């Protein structure tokens, strides 16, 4: 649940995509609210190619500048290579990098394809967990004190094509709830190690 002026911004961009006539009338009504740059709003809507690129570069920048932790919860983990590299570099310089991925999926091939990056990340010191209880569909990113919750996945389609919306959490109490949820979600899950990867089937290694 989101309250406050950012809800109107979400409605505005929904209208832009869905009904242009209503969009222009609502934009005129909201003109005083739109004086600040929308890309810096805590409500992150990738409604244009520019915004898609801006938010992807912003995520890369935040990972590059992370000091203590990068905790990512995502059901679909097939990102661009640049993101994989910066996660590896962050772990190498001592940042606590953890990725919680779903072991079950409604898109079966994802389970096979996302394991392509496991060996590289494990060698760099990234800790990876597979959520085994149900299909994981939560998407939360925790980078130091920056916390988001929303619909963005870490895959090419989400970054380059799909319409997504995320909220950068402002309230410290809500940040703590999401952080504690991530911590509580990992101990009982399957941690992927280099030893596990050595025992993959020939078919998995081939893929």
Image (tube, rainbow, N blue to C red):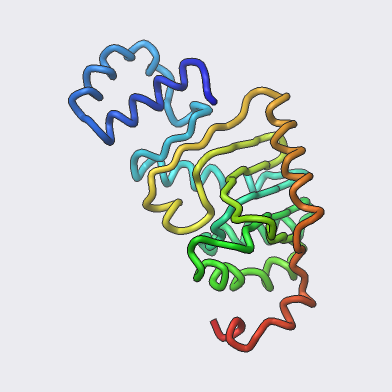
Extreme front residue here? 134
Q: Is residue 124 rendered to the left or right of residue 77? A: right
Expressed as whole percent of the image width and height from the top left, the position of residue 11 reads 36, 25
- Identify the image quadrant of the N terminus: top right
Q: On the image, which quarter does residue 149 sit in?
A: top right
Report the front residue among 182 and 38.
Answer: 182
Rendered image quadrant of residue 196: bottom right
Q: Quadrant of the C terminus?
A: bottom right
The residue positioned 34% from the left and 45% from the top of the image is 49
Residue at horizontal 72 percent and vertical 39 percent from the top:
144
Counting from the top left corner in percent of width and height, residue 137 is at: 56, 49
Write the residue at 81% across / 53% down.
Answer: 187
Report how many numbered discs are placed on residues in the image. 0
In the rendered image, the vertical position of residue 158 relative to residue 113, given as above or below: above
Q: Which quarter of the figure has residue 19?
A: top left
Q: Residue furthest left?
A: 21
């Amino acid at each position: 649940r989101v309250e406050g002026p950012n809800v109107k911004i979400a409605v505005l961009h929904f209208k832009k995509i869905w009904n242009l006539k209503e969009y222009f009338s609502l934009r005129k009504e909201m003109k005083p609210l739109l004086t600040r740059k929308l890309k810096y709003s805590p409500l992150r809507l990738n409604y244009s190619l520019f915004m898609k690129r801006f938010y992807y570069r912003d995520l890369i920048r935040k990972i590059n500048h992370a000091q203590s932790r990068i905790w990512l919860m995502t059901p679909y983990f097939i990102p661009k290579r640049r993101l994989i590299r910066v996660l590896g570099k962050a772990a190498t310089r001592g940042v606590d990098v953890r990725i919680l991925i779903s072991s079950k999926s409604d898109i079966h091939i994802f389970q096979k394809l996302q394991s392509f990056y496991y060996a590289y990340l494990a060698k760099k010191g990234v800790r990876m967990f597979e959520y085994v209880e149900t299909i994981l569909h939560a998407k939360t990113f925790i980078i130091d004190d920056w916390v988001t919750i929303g619909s963005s996945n870490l895959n090419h389609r989400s970054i380059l094509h799909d319409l997504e919306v995320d909220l950068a959490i402002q309230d410290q109490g809500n940040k703590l709830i999401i952080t504690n949820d991530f911590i509580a979600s990992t101990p009982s899950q399957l941690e992927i190690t280099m030893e596990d990867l050595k025992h993959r089937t020939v078919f998995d290694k081939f893929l």
